[in-house]
């Protein structure tokens, strides 16, 4: 008899395929990134991310509650201030848009979800870099750390359960952990954007936050070709006190996610970023891809690579499909 081996037997019926499925994708594993803008009356669409908006404080509250009802595991918040300065002071101000919105959501949702905040200055600086600049125009690592510590504390006080330092400054996890602990905020956790690459796929996000950046972030974000360096970043962040680590972007970095999953003693998140979202939405809008199938395949692949959780702009919608 030939063929002797017939793997197709396990694919014969939907029930059989369900029984032998290796990768679970559940709503609780999906985290919804959301944008809130200061001083707007109606939500503003983001043209390169169809379906995603800059929220007003009110629409944010409503959309966040809906996402939580759909079963998502958490929310990651980004703020877009009305005015910016060289130091990104709106990030630290308790009345800055991100801190105000965190307070709104914590009051609305309590502990029913995990509330996360982007701990990074780029949305708040007038030059668009993730840190403050030195006299030569370079990003000053250690001066930036002092601001991250204050920003993180402000976010914890505003109600964030998890802080997401995403600026790729050396020592950022350590200084934020130290500031939280000294203030008695020992329960506030850190989801470290540990392996964050200098990626072209962030393009639509720059529109989403009205980014002021000229040039690139290559002196702080990683070279897309480097996986060993990613593992070193992860190791350092864990040593500095990260409760979870992240790989970002996701789709071009599935091997990095796999390596991180094998090496990390803490949960691994992956960020299915704006450009990955935009590619699928654009192709689906043209009728070139089946939207729902593609999205579920993308998310399943990131889980299969080893991510415990996924930040994705499809989180609420996909959670509803999976329910
Ligand atoms: C930095 C930050 C960025 C993203 C998340 N946090 C932008 C950047 O590093 O340029 C990108 C997310 C996305 O593209 O979906 N605050």
Image (tube, helix red, strand yellow):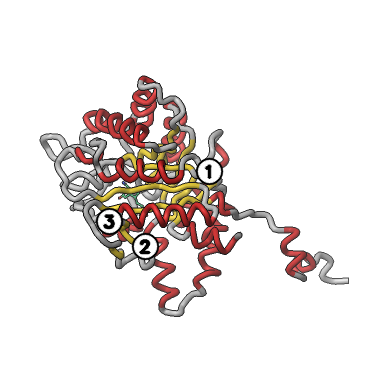
Q: Could you tell me which secondary element the residue under label 3 belongs to?
A: helix
Circle 1 sits on which residue?
Answer: 259
Mark 3: few/some/many CA within 10 Å (<14, 14-19, 20+): some
Marks 1/3: CA distance? 28 Å
Question: Which percent across, then down, holds residue 104?
Answer: 36, 44
N-terminal label among 2 and 1 = 2
Q: Which mark is residue 52?
A: 2
Q: Residue furthest left?
A: 135
Q: Residue furthest right?
A: 1
Question: Which percent across, then down, holds residue 194?
Answer: 41, 39
- The answer to which of 65 and 293 lies nearer the viewer is 65
Mark 2: few/some/many CA within 10 Å (<14, 14-19, 20+): some
Left or right: residue 289 compared with residue 121: right
Circle 3 sits on which residue?
Answer: 206
| Callout in the foreground (2, 1) | 2
- Say above or below: 196 vs 39: above
- The answer to which of 1 and 166 lies nearer the viewer is 166
Residue visible at 40% across and 52% down in the picture: 33
Residue visible at 40% across and 56% down in the picture: 62
Q: How many badges with numbers are in the image?
A: 3
Q: Which mark is residue 183?
A: none
Where the N terminus falls, by quadrant? bottom right
Marks 3/2: CA distance? 13 Å
Question: Which percent across, then down, holds residue 38?
Answer: 24, 51
N-terminal label among 3 and 2 = 2
N-terminal label among 1 and 3 = 3
- The answer to which of 205 and 217 lies nearer the viewer is 205
- Quadrant in which residue 95 is drawn: top left
| Callout in the foreground (1, 3) | 3
């Amino acid at each position: 008899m030939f063929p002797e081996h017939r793997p197709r037997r396990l694919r014969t019926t939907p029930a059989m395929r369900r029984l032998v499925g290796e990768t679970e994708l559940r709503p609780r594993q999906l985290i919804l990134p959301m944008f809130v803008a200061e001083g707007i009356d109606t939500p503003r669409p983001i043209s390169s991310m169809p379906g995603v908006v800059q929220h007003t404080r009110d629409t944010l509250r409503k959309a966040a509650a809906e996402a939580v009802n759909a079963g998502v595991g958490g929310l990651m918040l980004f703020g877009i201030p009305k005015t910016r300065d060289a130091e990104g002071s709106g990030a630290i101000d308790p009345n800055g848009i991100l801190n105000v919105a965190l307070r709104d959501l914590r009051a609305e949702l309590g502990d029913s979800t995990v509330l996360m905040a982007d701990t990074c200055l780029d949305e708040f600086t007038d030059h668009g870099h993730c840190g403050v600049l030195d006299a030569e125009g370079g990003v000053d690592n250690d001066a930036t750390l002092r601001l991250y510590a204050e920003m993180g504390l402000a976010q914890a006080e505003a109600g964030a359960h998890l802080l997401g330092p995403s600026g790729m400054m050396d020592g950022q996890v350590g200084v934020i952990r130290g500031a939280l602990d000294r203030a008695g905020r020992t329960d506030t956790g850190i989801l470290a954007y540990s392996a964050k690459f200098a990626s072209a796929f962030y393009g639509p996000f720059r529109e989403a936050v009205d980014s002021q950046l000229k040039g690139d972030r290559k002196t702080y974000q990683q070279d897309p070709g480097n996986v060993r360096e990613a593992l070193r970043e992860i190791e350092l962040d864990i040593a500095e006190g990260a409760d979870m680590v992240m790989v970002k972007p996701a789709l071009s970095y599935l091997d990095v996610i796999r390596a991180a999953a094998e090496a990390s003693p803490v949960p691994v998140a992956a960020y299915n970023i704006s450009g990955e979202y935009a590619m699928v939405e654009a192709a689906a809008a043209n009728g070139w891809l089946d939207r729902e199938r593609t999205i579920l395949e993308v998310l399943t692949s990131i889980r299969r690579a080893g991510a415990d959780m996924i930040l994705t702009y499809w989180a609420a919608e996909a959670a509803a499909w999976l329910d």
